[in-house]
Amino acid sequence: MSTQNLTLRIDPHVHSEDSYDGHEPVDLILEHAADIGLDAVVITDHDVMGESLRAAEMAPEYGLVGIPGVEVSTAHGHLLAIGVDSMPPHRESYAETVAWIHDHGGVAIVPHPFQRSRHGVRRKYIPIGGADASGDTEETVPAAVAGADGVDAIEAFNAWLFTGYRNRKARRFAAENDLAAVAASDAHTLEYVGRAFTEVTIPDADSVAAVTATDVLDALRAGSTSVAGRRAPVPMAARHYAIAAARKSGYYAKTGAIRSAAAARWGAMTAASTARVGAVQGAHRIARVASWLR
C-alpha cells in the first residue's frame, strides 16, 4: 500500500485543572479537541504531569495521538517539555533544562517568549545550538548558554497574547535563528483549546491512527511545521465559545447526574444500614428488658 505525507493539527500548549490556573478536566479537553478537528493536544500543566500522562494514555480513545508534556518553571522563565514522561528539574537554568529534555527524548519549545509578565524568557537566555541568541548589543550572553543544546522550536503564535507585537517578535526570532515555529492556544479554559494550532507534516503516513508520539516529535525537531494561529473573527469566536459552553454544560450535567445517582445509592445504603443496626439494637434492648422481668 502506498503512503504519503500526512498533515496533523496539534495544539501543543493546553492547561487542565491540574494547573493552579487551569479549569478543565482532561477528558473534556480531549473530547472537545477531537470534535473541533485536532489530531493531538498536549496537556502542559505548570510543573505537574499527572493529568498530562493520563491524557496521553486516554488520547487514542478519542482518535488522538497521545503526547505528554509539561510547562516547567526554569530559573529564566517558562519552557515547554514535549514528549517527556517525567518532570524536568525545577528552577534550573534554561540551557540545563533544555539539555535535560533532550536527554530524556523530548522536544524543548519556548512559550510566549520575551513576555516578562507571563514568565517569558529573555532572548539572551535562549540557547541556539551552540550560538548565542541575544541579538541585542545591550545584553551579554551568559557563558552557560554558549555551546549549549539549542531549543527545538519557538512559539511564534500564542493565542493568549492581546496584541500582535510579541507574536511578530517571536516569528522574527525564529526566522533569524532558523528555528521551527509553532502556534498554540495556551488554553486555560475549554473555549480557547484549538484557537491556535500547529500543522505538523508526518512523512510516509496514511492515517492518524498510524502516527505515534515519536513521529510527531521527530517532525517538530525537523522543523516540519507551519503556524495556523490567527485572531478569529468575532462571529467565529462566538460560535467557538457557544460550542464549548454547550459541551461543558452537557459534560457537567452528565457527571452531575452520575454523582447524584452515586450519592442517592450511598444514601440508600446508609439508611438501610442504619435501619438494620437500629433493628438489632432494638431487639437487644427488648431482650434485656424481658430478662429483667423474669
Image (spheres, helix red, strand yellow):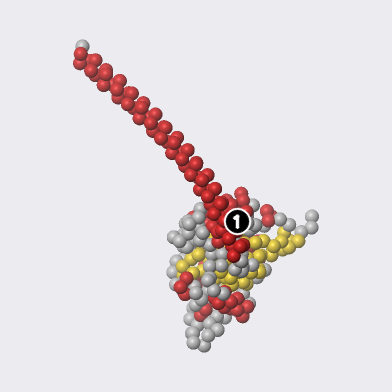
x and y percentages locating residue 130 in the rendered image: 57, 79
Which quarter of the rendered picture does the N terminus lie within?
Answer: bottom right
**Camera-nearest residue between 86 and 237:** 237
Q: Which SS class for mark 1?
A: helix
Image quadrant containing the C terminus: top left
The residue positioned farthest toward the bottom in the image shown: 137
* Residue occupying image coordinates x 44% and y 60%: 20
Which residue is at 66% across, 69% downward? 226
x and y percentages locating residue 45 in the rendered image:
49, 61
Q: Is residue 135 left or right of residue 276?
A: right
Residue that lies at the very extreme toward the right in this rendered image? 1
Residue drawn at x 65%, y 61% as measured from the top left: 9
Quarter-wise, where is residue 198 in the image?
bottom right
Observer able to see residue 211: yes
Q: Which residue is mark 1?
A: 33
Instruction: Please identify the quarter of the rendering in which residue 64 is found.
Output: bottom right
